[in-house]
Amino acid sequence: MTYDDFRAGELQGWDARANTYETATARATVQSIPDLLAAARVAPGKRLLDVCCGPGFAAGAAAALGVEAHGVDFAPGMVRAAQARFPCVTFVEGDAENLPFDDASFDVVVCNFGVNHVTDPVRAAREAYRVLGPDGYYAYSAWLPPEQNPAFKLIFGSVGTYADMSAAPPAPDQFALACTEGARFLTDIGFMEIAHRTVQGILCAPASGLFDYLMRWSVRMPLIVQNQSEAVREKIRKAIETEARAFIVGDEIRIPLLSIVVSSHKGEVAS
């Protein structure tokens, strides 16, 4: 199965969010960056590639640690936003499944919540393996599935109850790689020492208007919801905002948001 419509929607959606990412999505995704960089053995002097870099927060954090950081993203708006925010880092447009870099160009490759936005995560991991030099490390982060993740249980429970999922473009399972079993494909590619750690985060949003906030926060949810009837959209809105009342703290909604960081080692290349 091909996911051309999904890819086109993701590209359009993230490109449009380049200048607002910091006020919504980043409040969640940056929480995993310390664990991601630690799992990838980031150290001064290393050459690092941040795949699906968005506006560059992981690459920027790595550069602050003395790393020679580079970033790549398929959305032109994200690349421009990243370069403006982190001028000491080199950012380029490119496809995670066909990276525009030579073999063995980097010591570290990271992907912060990008594996669920590509059409073929296994191919993207093969590309990460290709551009890594001997003894290189690859690490990615991904959201845990709804049964383990209160924030996504609230969101996708409400969407799944009312939405006609067939109205959305076909898409890969965004939670397929968010477990130790799902990460076993890394061994088939040639990676070793597969490890994982759970990151305890929080989805923080305004106390009112969570539905509208989530429509800005993600792209996959709008790809589903925008294809529903107005009546169904209102049912989803009501369900989300009703469920969210249990998580109001002061003037914010604070819902536990769990992710996994998976790391692996390329090891020495056999002669």
Image: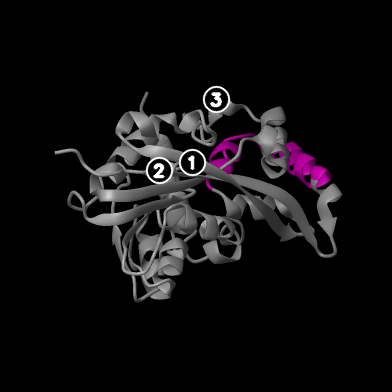
For the residues bearing labels 2 and 3, Cβ distance under 8 angstroms: no
> Tag 1: residue type?
Ala
Looking at the figure, which quarter contains the N terminus? Answer: top left
Camera-nearest label, 2 or 3:
2
Q: Is residue 178 visible?
A: yes
Q: Is residue 189 above or below residue 267?
A: above
Q: Which residue position holds label 3?
A: 166
Q: Are marks 1 and 2 in contact (CB under 8 Å)?
A: yes
**Residue 147 horizontal side relative to residue 248, left or right:** left
The structure residue drawn at horizontal position 49% and vertical position 59%, both measured from the top left corner, is: 17
**Residue 164, position as x, y percentages in the image:** 62, 27
Residue 134 position within the rendered picture, expressed as x and y whole percent measured from the top left: 24, 48
Number of numbered discs overlaid on the protein picture: 3
Q: Secondary structure at mark 1?
A: strand
The magenta stretch spans which residues?
Answer: 219-243
Q: Upstream in the sequence, badge 3 or badge 1? A: 3
Q: Nearer the viewer, residue 117 or 138?
A: 138
Horizontal side of 187 relative to 217 (left or right) equals left
Residue 223 in the magenta stretch? The answer is: yes
Nearer the viewer's eye, disc 3 or disc 1? 1
Give the residue number, with chain letter if any, for mark 1.
195
Q: CA distance from mark 2 to mark 3?
A: 35 Å
Q: How is the image coloured?
A: one colour
Give whichever of discs 1 and 2 has the lower sequence position: 1
Spatial separation of the CA atoms under disc 1 and disc 2: 6 Å
Magenta-colored stretch includes residue 254? no
Q: Which mark is residue 263?
A: none
Report the amino acid beneath label 2: Ser
Badge 2 is on which residue?
264
